[in-house]
Image (tube, rainbow, N blue to C red):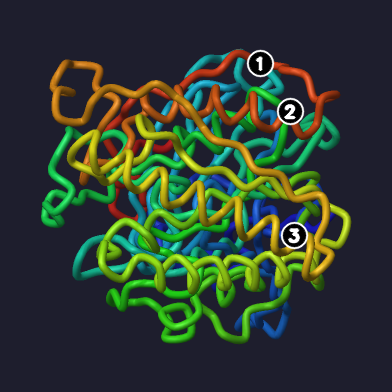
Amino acid sequence: MAERSVQDVIEFGKVGRESLRGVDPAFYPADAPEIQFKGRHAQFSCSLKDGETAVVTQFAYSATSLSFAYKGTAVYARMNGGGNYFNVISDGVLVRVIQTSEDLETYMLIQHESKAAPSAVRTLVLEKRSEASVRSALDWFDVVSLYGLYICGHLVPEVVQPHRYCIEFLGDSDTSAMGCEGEHTSVDDIWSLDPSKQNAANSYAAIASRVLDAECHQVCWSGLKVHSAPPTLGTDGSVVTGGMRALYPRVLPNEIMSPSPANMKNRYPDVIVIHLGACDVTDARVDTWGKTAATFTEQYIEMLKHIRTRHREVPILCVAPDQETVSMERTREGQARTSQRLQECVAAAIALAASQHDIKDVHFKVLAAGLQDPEESQQEKSDWALLGHWSSEGHLKVAVAMVRAIQEVNPLWTRQNLPFVYPHMDAEQTGVSNATCAIL
C-alpha cells in the first residue's frame, strides 16, 4: 500500500502545511484500494516535483462519491474541488457540507475529540452534491480533481461493502436535484438559483437507490434535452448540439476527449433509468406540436439505439411524470399538457424502437407521486423549491414512485432501507490553508 507523510509529498502538501505543522498524518493516494468510488470517475497519472508519479481521480457528475473506513482522529482531503459542494457523511449521518474553491487545497472533512476515537472503526462518505456544470445563470462548476486523503490514523480495508445493485439515472435538473433545499420560487426567476441549495443526495435517484441498496450513478445536466442543451456558460458546444447523445459516452461530461465508460473501472449498471424529455416538450408551440413530437420521438429512438450499443442486455426503464408530478410548470393545466405530451412521445418511441430496430427490454412507467398543486404550495413543507423544481420532500415522494417502477421491472429487487432525506445544512469553507478549523 502506497503511504507517505505530508512532508514527503511536496506537491500535495504545499498549501495548508502551516496549519498541519506538528501533525504527521498518513497520506493515501486517490487510487488506494481502501477507497471506493461510486459514480463515473477517471484516474490519471501525474508527475510530482521529485520525479515520482501520483494518481489523480477526476469526476464531475452529481452524487459521485468516495467512501472508506478508518481508525483515527481526523481526515483531510487534498483536492481541487472545482468550486463544488460536498456532503460529509460519517457513519450514515450528515455532519458537514463543504464549499470548495477552484484551487488545490487541503480540506478538513472530520475531526474526533473523543479519546476513544483512535480505536473506533468509522466510515466516511464524501459525496458531490452539486451538478456537472450549471452553477448559476452566469457561472459553472469545474471538474473535481482528488489527489488523496490525509488520515491521522489509518484506513481499514474490507469494511465498506459494495451495494447489491447499480442504477444509472439519465436526466436533467430533476435528477440532479436543482434547488431542492431552497424556497419555492417562480419557474422564470433565474436569479433565485442558488448552487448551495442543490443536494444530489436528496434527489429521487439517490433516495430510491438507498432504498434498494444500489449504487446511484447520475448522468444528468440542468436543462439537458434528448438532442440538445441550452448554451449556458461553461457548456461544451457538442453538448449544446447533441444533448444526452453527446453526454452519455463521457466520464467527464464537459470533456470531448473524456474516457469512455467502457474503458474505465466504473461499475456497470443493472438497470438504466431515463427520466428525460420535459425540457424538449414543455415550451413547444401548440400549432407546431405535431412536427415537434415527430422530431422528438425520432431523437428519443436514436438515444435508445446509442445506449443499446454500450449496454446490450441491461434493462432500460423510461419514465414520465403524471399531471401532478411534472416540475417547472406554474399550473396544473401546464403540468397536464407536458405530461400528456411526454407520455405519448416516449411510449411511441419505445414501440418504434422495438418494431423497427429490434431494441428490446425497454419498459415505460408513469410516475405518480401525488405532489401538491404548485399554485397552492406555500406551506412550510412544500413539495416545490427553487425555479419550480421539486423540494427534498417532493423528491422523497417521487422516489417512492420510482422504487415501485423499478421493482415492476425487477420483481426480485426488495426494499432494504426506508426512504429518507438528509437534513438541510449550510455550507462551510474548511480548507485548512484558510485556518477555518482547529487541528488536533
Please name whichever residue, 10 or 195, is drawn nearer the observer in this view of the structure. 195
Q: Secondary structure at mark 3?
A: loop
Q: Quadrant of residue 131?
A: bottom left
The disc placed on residue 408 is 2
Work out whether 260 lies above or below 201. below
**Closer to us: 138 or 286:** 286
Q: In this image, 417 relative to 228: left or right?
A: right
Quadrant where the N terminus sits is bottom right
Which of discs 1 and 2 lies nearer the camera? The answer is: 2
Q: Which residue is mark 1?
A: 417
Amino acid under disc 3: Asp
- The x and y percentages for residue 267 are 79, 53
Marks 1 and 3, Cα distance to the nearest angstrom? 30 Å
Q: Residue 132: where, in percent of width, then height?
A: 45, 62
Residue 205, image quadrant:
top right
- Does 181 sit left or right of 265 as displayed? left
- Mark nearest the camera among 1 and 3 is 1
How far apart are labels 1 and 2 at the CA level?
A: 18 Å
- Disc 1 residue type? Asn
Which numbered disc flags the more N-terminal residue, 1 or 3?
3
Residue in the picture at 63% in, 69% down: 303
Where is mark 3, residue-wise? 31
Q: Is residue 84 left or right of residue 303?
A: left
Q: Residues within 10 Å of mark 1 (few under 14, many from 20)?
A: few
- For disc 3, the neighbor class at 10 Å (few under 14, some 14 to 19, many from 20) is many
